[in-house]
Amino acid sequence: MLSVRPSHHLSPGPYPRLVAAGFRQQSAYRLAALAGLVANTTFGFLKVALLLATVEAAGGELRGYDVGTMSAYVWLSQGLLGSVNLYGRSEMAERIRTGDVVVDFLRPLDVHAAAVATEVGRGLFALLPRGVPSVLVGAVVVGMTMPTTPGPYLLGAVSVLLGITVSAATAYLVAATGFWLVETRGVALLYMVVAGFLAGLYVPIGIFPAPLFWLATATPFPAMLMYPVDVLSGRVDGLASVGLVAAQVGWLLVVGALGQLMTRRGRRRLEVQGG
């Protein structure tokens, strides 16, 4: 059992630089980003074919979605797929498993905030080679209904940033279970199945049956993907869109507090293999 001294320097100074570092680090994997773009657009075409056929079978409108708004949902959600962490995998999980996290605790940084900031930087980079191009492909080839005023795009940019941050902070919770479990691949697999479904990755949560819809909104997962898509596409506007962004802030505070708590408790149980 190894005990280490806590480090809780939460001044904002180094964390924006960690976001930039994560951005630069991810930019080294350009071929992987290109492969991700191909996968995004390929599955986007499959998804849009299925969902547009469903809308047409429903008479041209399904729970408020017509062909244009459903296409916007498909391509925006595909565009965000590379940036929001719905897989539960993270570098921190491996550092906890191998014991390398002990080095992180010795640094003059808050381990939790540093890990989330780096993950956010990686997610922001993915918007450039994967997110924006896949949305443009969808807009040109299939077409979609998008807002004609700048408001939804400005608020949508904030919502996208919050969605990426909430996903990074929630994925950190998966990694933090490693303080107790050491091996977190099973937890990450369960997280991937639940997160993708409740975040609205496969179908919009607005077409869920009522009990499942309320179950989804009681979790942070729609705040990662569905809320940014609704705000950007203009499907939800005015005060309702501000409410979605406020909900994202609320979830960020909740998962952030849980991350701090699990980090402090986990540090006390930290075991380093061979140590």
Image (cartoon, rainbow, N blue to C red):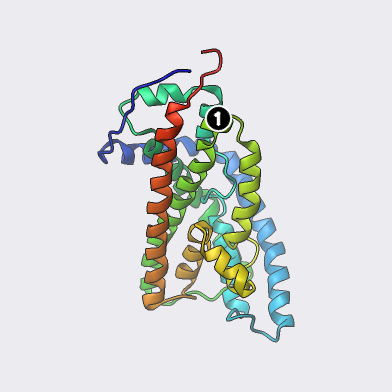
In the image, is residue 16 above or below residue 229?
above
Q: Count neighbours of disc 1 (C-alpha within 10 A) and say few if under 14, some if 14 to 19, many if 20 or more.
A: some
Q: Amino acid at mark 1?
A: Glu
Which x, y percent locates residue 250? 38, 59
Q: Secondary structure at mark 1?
A: helix
Q: Nearer the viewer, residue 20 or 111?
A: 111
| 6 relative to 208 in the view: left or right | left
On the question of residue 183 being in view, the answer is yes
Residue sitting at 61 percent across and 51 percent down? 37
Q: Picture coordinates of residue 173 (x, y %)?
A: 49, 42
Residue 67 position within the rendered picture, expressed as x and y whole percent measured from the top left: 63, 78
Query: Residue at 58% across / 81% down in the picture?
Result: 64
Question: Which residue is at a point 42% across and 21% down the rendered structure image?
Answer: 103
Viewer-nearest residue: 1 or 226: 1
Observer able to see residue 27:
no
Image coordinates for residue 134, horizontal then vertical, percent: 58, 58
Q: Can you name the residue that lies furthest to the top here?
A: 274
Instruction: Tell me: residue 180, above or below residue 165.
Output: above
Q: Is residue 211 above or below residue 27?
A: below
Is 122 left or right of 17, judged from the image as shown? right
- Residue designated by label 1: 94
Query: Looking at the image, how many numbered discs can be counted on the residues?
Result: 1
Tell which of 41 and 269 is nearer to you: 269
As displayed, is residue 166 above or below residue 110? below
